[in-house]
Amino acid sequence: MAAAAEPRARAWLGGSSPRPGSPASSPELGGRGRARPGPGPGPGPGSGSGPERAGARPPGPAATGHSFRKVTLTKPTFCHLCSDFIWGLAGFLCDVCNFMSHEKCLKHVKTPCSSVAPSLVRVPVAHCFGLRGLYKRKFCAVCRKGLEAPALRCEVCELHVHPDCVPFACSDCRQCHRDGHRDHDTHHHHWREGNLPSGARCEVCRKTCGSSDVLAGVRCEWCGVQAHSVCSTALAPECTFGRLHTMVLPPACVRLLSRNFSKMHCFRISESPAPEPGEGDDGAEGSSPASLGREVLPPESSKHTLKVFDGNDALQRNHFRVITVPRLARSEEVLEAALRAYYVAEDPRDFELQALPQPVHAADTGARGRPWSGGVAEEEGGRGPGAREAVPEACIIRALPRTQEVLKIYPAWLKPRVLRASSWWRCSWVAGKSSGRCWRMKSPCSSGFVTSGRSLGTSLRQMNQMRFYVAESRAVAPHVRLFVGGLPPGLSAQEYGSLLDEAVATKAGLVSVSHVYSSQGAVVLDVTCFAEAERLYMLVRDTAVHGRPLTALVLPDVLHTNLPPDCCPLLVFVNPKSGGLKGRDLLCSFRKLLNPHQVFELTNGGPLPGFHVFSQVPCFRVLVCGGDGTVGWVLAALEETRRHLACPEPSVAILPLGTGNDLGRVLRWGAGYSGEDPFSVLVSVDEADAVLMDRWTILLDAQEAGGAENSMADVEPPKIVQMSNYCGIGIDAELSLDFHHAREEEPGKFTSRLHNKGVYVRVGLQKISHSRGLHREIRLQVEQREVELPSIEGLIFINIPSWGSGADLWGSDSDSRFEKPRMDDGLLEVVGVTGVMHMGQVQGGLRSGIRIAQGSYFRVTLLKATPVQVDGEPWIQAPGHMIISAAGPKVHMLRKTKQKPRKAGTPKDARADGVPVPEGDPK
């Protein structure tokens, strides 16, 4: 009996059992009498798992890496392949990733298991996880369970994961630019499994492929084509970018050498705190993931809860996974459960579990623990083959010493010459021709890096994810562009260079100033060293010049010569502070529907970085998401950078997120965004008509009367303000100023358009009895002609037929004295109001304003300090002069086309070639 028990005890330690193929070899059995798959899906020798018992594992594609077993169903369950209901009491469940399938569907399973999926990705691209949110009826891409608690979502693609599953998420985000190494001329579909709308239909068979019950179906995250995972193989691999192909900036036309920079930095995404471990769901027997770092709950009578660490790194950080196993579990069962918890698909006999001393100290990485060799609960008749070992409270997975290593070699780009593990480590092995698949190469263990990583107890998961590439041995010339904003305006290139050298100690031989935007206090630096670019980026973000913090952004290069002939990419600006939380949601949606490199957050550097990136694009359009003030901000930046643009007159569309949104109303974009489909918004922009609109310049020359009547002393230097909608003087500007002060005192309350209008009403009632006599405090000249003002409290210059949230201040009555107003006629209309009551009647449609004048040149003299507002931005203007005149060329705006009535029988959501609506935004 003792001799028979020795092999089982050795298998408990892992790695000492006879290998498959030897005379004494036997099938590698899991904890439930099934055969586990081999270490990986690669072709060639070493990819098998040895002989299998008949009936030990259902037939299926070995490359998927699933570990299916037959289970009894106790509740309604759906198949993850066909999304149909599983009738009967039996289904087949993967013990690692929880993939559930019909027996008839097993042979058609193409979706890889979470344990092998990272090894199948040709070009790993990291995800950009934002803040946690609630995503209804969404499923985790790692463990395939529902997202009931706050979860994480990638800001660039439609990947949803539990916080505890983030370390095991496959790095298969969209590749949005060329990085100089793995560049391709053709663009293929980028499939993302599951989380499709419940009514989604397959592009091939036209049957329903979406499900709100399980993670099923696939969707291309560029063109939006949806299909069953089996049907997707029948589609052409090339992606055409779908309905938005003319608006998307192709990844092959964007170059960014992103070494030393994270994807959050490359896409200019505001960084959020990393997800803290230990906030997910506890794993049950035979399933994963379990939780990281969670306090262990009191165990059940027949179960045992075990903390598992996968190396010294996890032990030092106290990041562990929790597994639940039977108290009398065999050693093989516990070891396999521990490997499943970390999604390690290698041979369990290459590892052992070592019990850790209690209590476990996170900083004590030198404690290697002891193998489990005692504490055995013997069966009747002594220690025999059926003996069970007691399970400790915590253990660590260790790799056993190997005489040779199996390295996965991936083909890179062009002629493979040299084996490269990363940008900083090289081997001298030479590989053969590239077959488009990963190679597996067995060699004597001369790789000191791999051996030392295992022997020193480095994280097994990290070592398992290490990649080796066969690539041409060539040096990549470093070139990084950094945008630096927040500098003092009005300086020369040499002065900006000296200022930056003094502030952040730039290196003259590696850093040069390529572009200067003096009026906006910004420069673009060309850096020829990756380390220096990283140092400058981090240092500039923590530096202030003259009391103003600097802004640093990593900018890509747009290869405009590679753009398709019909491509007119859309440059998107989003103000996340507008419209409550809707601005941030739209920012995420547009990053997913388009290329993230063409979407810019206005609170991070303003509109100038976007115009600089698109400066060489011969034809592009602009979408501004924000209020009227945001639109004016972008139009002003466009006016200042027009001479640097290859497309000097891009058309501008508006997605109104503000309170008044008068310009959006005139251009038919609506009174405000109320949650419409972002895809439909982009389609409307693509179909919009171009119209012209006047822009006006207001010169503010503040002066104060001196001792003599004709003696004037300058109070402040003159400044210029651009106007698109209207300019108000008097009571109109005073109400805007009171609203502005109220919003600055409590900005958190001003997240609703209805609340904002309520505050306007409140401040208006407070001024209802106010009498200023504005006509006695100002003088007006129109076309060098003095105009006598009637008794008014407010004077308003309007350029568009909408004021105060859609009111027609000029009125619709015909008047022989004036021409019919248009926003492109080169004329401004001057209207007066007698007070708050008059303004309320105008907004209610009961009256119109007092028509005073119409012209193209105005001179206003302010005899006293008076409230002034331009496009909703108010301030107190000192006594002096205001000169209003036309501001050069007209701007091209996009006006939404009138919606045609829908034909009977047309599906409401017919998008055969369009991008589907991103769902799951936090509510």
Image (cartoon, rainbow, N blue to C red):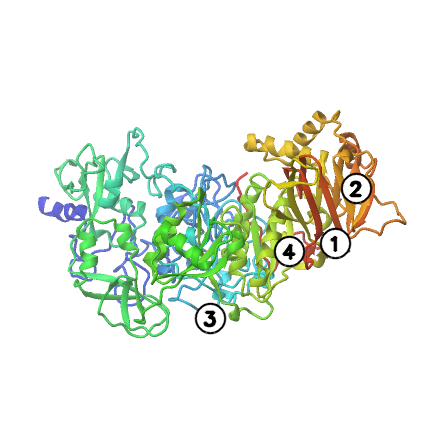
Say which residue label 1 marks.
898
Could you say where residue 150 lies in the image, as x and y percent from the top left? 45, 38
Could you say where residue 240 lies in the image, as x and y percent from the top left? 55, 65
Q: Is residue 446 left or right of residue 270?
A: left
Nearest the eye: 322 or 90: 322
Closest to the camera, between mark 2 and mark 3, is 2
Q: Quadrant of residue 825?
A: bottom right
The three-letter code of the residue at mark 2 reads: Val
The three-letter code of the residue at mark 4 reads: Val
Q: Residue at x 23, y 62 (%)?
A: 406
Say which residue label 3 marks.
185
Q: Is residue 778 left or right of residue 364?
A: right
Could you say where residue 245 lies in the image, as x and y percent from the top left? 58, 63
The three-letter code of the residue at mark 3 reads: Asp
Closest to the camera, between mark 4 and mark 3, is 4
- Which of the marked residues, 2 or 1, is nearer the chain's N terminus? 2
Q: Is residue 660 visible?
A: no
Q: Is residue 107 visible?
A: yes
Alpha-carbon span between mark 2 and mark 3: 59 Å
Say which residue label 4 marks.
652
Nearest the eye: 1 or 486: 486
Q: Is residue 174 left or right of residue 593?
A: left
Q: Is residue 136 left or right of residue 373?
A: right
The local secondary structure at tag 3 comes to loop
Residue at the farthest front position: 708
How many C-alpha atoms fall within 10 Å of the one at disc 1: few (<14), some, or many (≥20)? few
The local secondary structure at tag 2 comes to strand
The local secondary structure at tag 4 comes to strand
